[in-house]
Image (spheres, helix red, strand yellow):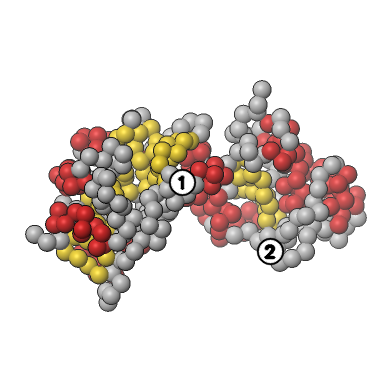
Amino acid sequence: MAPVILDVRNAHDVRDIVHRSVQALAEGSVVAFPTETVYALAASALNEPAVRRLVEIRGNAEDNPCALAIKSLDEALDYVPRLTPICQRLARRCWPGPVTLRVPDNDPGSLLRQLPAPVQEWLRVEQGVGYRVPAHRLILDAMRFLPGPLAVINANRPGQPLAVSADEVLRSLGHEVDMVLDDGRSQFAQPSSIVEVGERGFRMVRAGVVSGETLQRLSSMLILFVCTGNTCRSPMAEAICRQLVADRLKCRIDQLEDRGVLVMSAGVSAAQGGGATPEAVQVMSEEGLDLSGHVPQQVNERLVRHADVIFTLTQGHRHALVSYWPDAAPRTFVLSPDQQDVADPIGGPRDLYKRCADQIREAITRRLDELNLPESNP
């Protein structure tokens, strides 16, 4: 039987296409979805016969096994309860997006155990399973209406070019697919990057849209300091933190990024242009730290999402952040472990800035003891 082809671009209501694909998946069909990378075959991971068909259609796929498509990092934690910090960083910063994270399957509490045993085996590669959150509205919307995840795999036969359009899916797989959602050419027309993540790092299994260099940066710990205007308190905190972390890692400040640590600052009401206040620049210069090139920036969704830990200079700053980004609450703390506000020295004399810097240094020193920093070189 010829597959059902649904033209997404000319649909009157895309929701109808989503509902038809959900019904097909629930009934055990194999559906070809567009993603931001290439077209992918999908089947309900709860349906053993459907996943078996998917594997048989795709043929020998040792170089590209099935992955598990899920909706979010929160759902990933149901399948990998002890997700490593590096893996959480990559997931938080790359999903939804063109990165498949392959992690060990060694947790007895994993929701993966609820899938049929053969499906678990089809997903497993060298004792690991790949997880993906595609950045395409159709497959993400479909998963919202399904009781479980999807098993997905590239929609082409081994040895053939990747299918980056519905026509290429049909030429490669013909009548073996039950439904094809045609949304034109894929955005990137390249495969996702497959990254195997362990306790201490990661390795690139398959090069794709996201380069190894970019992934290395995205896997770094990001410490973010937030005040009001990002002109005095948080820039001083950024500079002091870099110095203290470099001392702990036994490296130079300019080597921190290579050692897997990024330190940044922002303001909840930062204005465009300008720089750090002259007093902040002077006080930091006296400590051998350079703020002359600092450019204030407004705190934004990307910074908050990427940060491993956010330190606010006052209780009010924390309240403002978590009110706007409640998901960041578990990662957002008042800098002082004693919950003391660091008062704004703006407009005050140099001595006030010096006392402010001393208070910040003492608080950061205590806070660093709580962080899981990378190990120093011997």
Residue that badge 2 annotates: 269
**Residue 259 falls left or right of residue 60:** right
Name the residue at the bottom extreme. 12
| Position above or below: 222 against 372 | below
**Residue 91 falls left or right of residue 367:** left
Residue 258 picture location, percent across and down: 63, 38
**Residue 89 falls left or right of residue 142:** right
* On-image quarter of the C terminus: top right
Rendered residue at 31%/34% (across/down): 125
Q: Quadrant of residue 213?
A: top right
Q: Secondary structure at mark 1?
A: helix
Rendered residue at 20%/43% (across/down): 59
The local crowd at label 1, few if under 14, some if 14 to 19, many if 20 or more residues have their Cα within 10 Å, is many
| Position above or below: 271 against 82 | below
Q: Nearer the viewer, residue 291 or 330?
A: 291
In space, the residues marked 1 and 2 are separated at their CA atoms by 29 Å
* On-image quarter of the N terminus: bottom left
Residue 173 picture location, percent across and down: 19, 54
| Position above or below: 184 against 310 | below
The local crowd at label 2, few if under 14, some if 14 to 19, many if 20 or more residues have their Cα within 10 Å, is some
Residue that badge 1 annotates: 91
Q: Secondary structure at mark 2?
A: loop
For badge 1, the amino acid type reads: Ala
Residue 311 picture location, percent across and down: 65, 47
Residue 25 picture location, percent across and down: 20, 55
For badge 2, the amino acid type reads: Ser
Judge whether residue 150 can be spotted in this image.
no
